Amino acid sequence: MTHTYTRRYTGPLKAVVLDWAGTTVDFGCLAPAAAFMEAFRRSGVDITLEQARAPMGMPKWNHIQAITRMPPVAQAWAAKRGEAPTDVDVDALYERFLPLQVGVVAEHSALIPGALDAVEAMRARGLRIGSTTGYPAPVMEVVIAEAAKQGYRPDCVVCAGETPAGRPGPYMALKCLIDLQVSPVQACVKIGDTVVDVEEGLNAGMWTIALTDTGNEVGLPLAEWRSLPEEKRAALRAPAADKLARAGAHYVVPSLADALPLLDVIEARLARGETP
């Protein structure tokens, strides 16, 4: 006779793992897109904003590689350079991208409205605040310093390049939990604004909440977003929400502030013995 042993966590949430650009800072996730476009332009190939944004959330080297593998980009590159882009070209683009990104990121490190209050509310309920990013450490030094000036200091930051692989793998999110000394994974919520944020959380065994209005999928600067009538916002939000939901997000909301009520919902699900 076979016995199955089921072990379920039914306690409270212990930590959130937050993304950076498009989630807590840089409304619209503007800094990376601009730097990608400029790096390619300086290499003699123009890419569109849509192409620059498509792989957002991945480590930046992998992001550049993903852009070079898009057929229209590869064709334009071959037309300009005589052959399709290789990983040696990706290395060169990355070296060009990095100083551009460091240069532009300080201008795009303003906290997203409501994010700081949301983080304080999470701390007030006893949650640890982890964070992961597709940015490498040299870029994050600037972002961390700018965020700290505005009062945002997460308990840990895991950058691209600090784990065996980046998103959509689980390793950065799991490193957060190791650094925070938090377990089990079911007691944690990953919150971000891209498909690979969602996949990172799911692959790590966490609950996931995806954000539409503030992030990469809508991709508008704050002033422009605020100037839109509600029906225009809804029209931009709907495809973003659909894409993130199809990626497997447990919940999709407009911004980090809107994620707060869901923490109670998730705790109730845990208490009932549900898992992510």
Image (cartoon, rainbow, N blue to C red):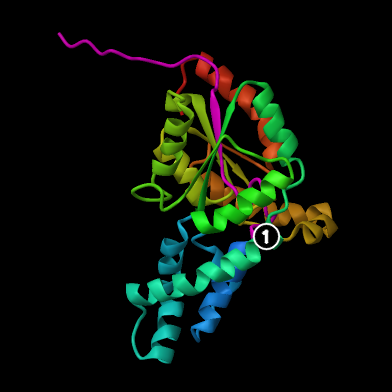
- Percent coordinates x, y for residue 197 in the rendering: 51, 46
What residue do we see at 55% from left, 48% from top? 244
Vertical relation: 184 (above or below) 256: above
Would you say residue 215 is visible in this rendering?
A: yes
Q: Mark 1 points at which residue?
A: 106
7 or 162: which is nearer to us? 162
Magenta-highlighted residues:
1-30
106 relative to 50 in the view: left or right: right
What residue do we see at 69% from left, 23% from top? 124
Quadrant, the N terminus:
top left
- Percent coordinates x, y for residue 240 in the rendering: 61, 53
- Toward the left, the furthest residue is 1
What secondary structure predominates along the stretch shown in magenta?
loop
209 or 41: which is nearer to us? 41
> Could you tell me the amino acid type at mark 1?
Ala
- Percent coordinates x, y for residue 54 in the rendering: 52, 63
What residue do we see at 73% from left, 53% from top? 110
- Percent coordinates x, y for residue 77 in the rendering: 42, 84
167 relative to 259 in the view: left or right: left
The secondary element bearing badge 1 is classed as helix
